[in-house]
Amino acid sequence: MQPGLCQLFLVLYGLWMVTARPSEDAAAASPPDDFPSLPPILHPGYFSPDYKGNMIPGLVSSWSPNDPTNVWELSGLREGDIMEDGPKSRNVVSDPESLWADATIPYILEPMFTDAERKTIREGMEMIQKDTCFKFRPFRIGDMDFVYIQGGPTGCWSYVGRQGGGQVVNLQRAGCVYKGVVAHELLHAAGFFHQQSAADRDEYVFVNYTNIQSGRESNFDKYNESVVSDFGVGYDYGSVMHYSRKAFSKNGEDTLVPLKDGAEIGNRDSVTDKDMAKLKAKYGCSEGSEVTEAPSNYGTMMFEAGNQLLSLFVAPPN
Ligand SMILES: *[C@@H]1O[C@H](CO)[C@@H](O)[C@H](O)[C@H]1NC(C)=O
Ligand SMILES: *[C@@H]1O[C@H](CO)[C@@H](O)[C@H](O)[C@H]1NC(C)=O
């Protein structure tokens, strides 16, 4: 089929799907047999039996950008927002396997996001993409690895690095859809850990264990240089990946104190030049690129997979 026809087919099919959806029969909403299937989301997020999730949605949705903490510190996972498939798996930033091919993350946005939310999510992507070769582009048939951005009520979280197959980034609609928070979670997906877990962090910040909630001390672990690298760029107080002063505080006192006078930590608004220098070094490339933006409703289709309603956001052909 010609690309134009193929597109038309996909769009018409998408419209048919959407209008056909109210059907009582879930089977009616599955794609036709010859429709290319979405690769499985192999990493949908894992919540251990002792995960205490019932407080999270409320904590996250009542967060405001003026709060002293970062919202992603509130998501109840390791270091707040780092998703892992099990207690033992730890994917590391220096592992070449965790890199994205062509420095590109194909993404699918869950259909529940509004146009305004989609715009904010794209702005988060743009911050990263504008001055680096790193790219986000809508999923295309044939992509094996991709990020599925969903808005469920489980806080803000991401895996660190490419996991293989589909992997979820969660941006709880109430609380996480801010461009700086989006950039933070997407930088995790690109392979970033938190700044203060760097091996040399004790030269830059004091961790005041007296003020840390009991049981949360391991959130302040450091990783050695074989696990994380700063590519010679150096410690960055201003990083969008840095904890706030009051991260995991049990008493409202500082848990992290910059050793340099006047240094500010806890940025949740924008990426820094150093963040981007590390991303470029990690992916070995430097030039910026245009954001490829598909119209928000381009070829979006929804279908049932298992008991999940998935949307397939089909990009225009090359
Ligand atoms: C650590 O926190 C305690 C309690 O707030 C405070 O008394 C102490 O001075 C802090 N230590 C440093 C080195 O900031
Ligand atoms: C660095 O950390 C990794 C993972 O925890 C560990 O396997 C390795 O032995 C450590 N290397 C050094 C030099 O401490």
Image: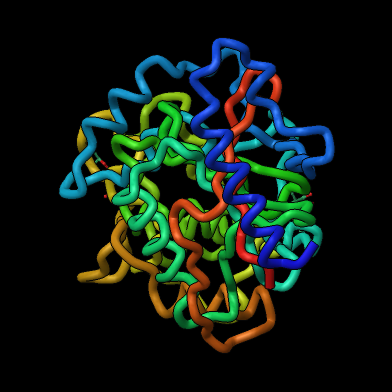
Residue 189 sits above or below residue 152 on the image: below
x, y percent for residue 294: 50, 63
Name the residue located 63 percent from the left edge and 61 percent from the top edge. 105
Q: Is residue 191 visible?
A: no
Q: Is residue 86 visible?
A: yes
Q: Nearer the viewer, residue 268 or 35?
A: 35
Name the residue located 31 percent from the left edge and 46 percent from the top edge. 70
Residue 31 sits above or below residue 93 on the image: above
- Determine which quarter of the picture holds residue 106: bottom right
x, y percent for residue 188: 55, 54
Tag count in the figure?
0
- Determine which quarter of the picture holds residue 134: bottom right
Give the residue at the far right of this rendering: 34
Q: Is residue 234 left or right of residue 113?
A: right
Q: Quadrant for the N terminus, please.
A: bottom right
x, y percent for residue 86: 71, 29
Name the residue located 71 percent from the left edge and 63 percent from the top edge. 100
Name the residue located 78 percent from the left edge and 41 percent from the top edge. 35
Q: Is residue 211 left or right of residue 121?
A: left
Q: Nearer the viewer, residue 290 or 240?
A: 290
Q: Nearer the viewer, residue 222 or 40?
A: 40
Q: Nearer the viewer, residue 81 or 231?
A: 81
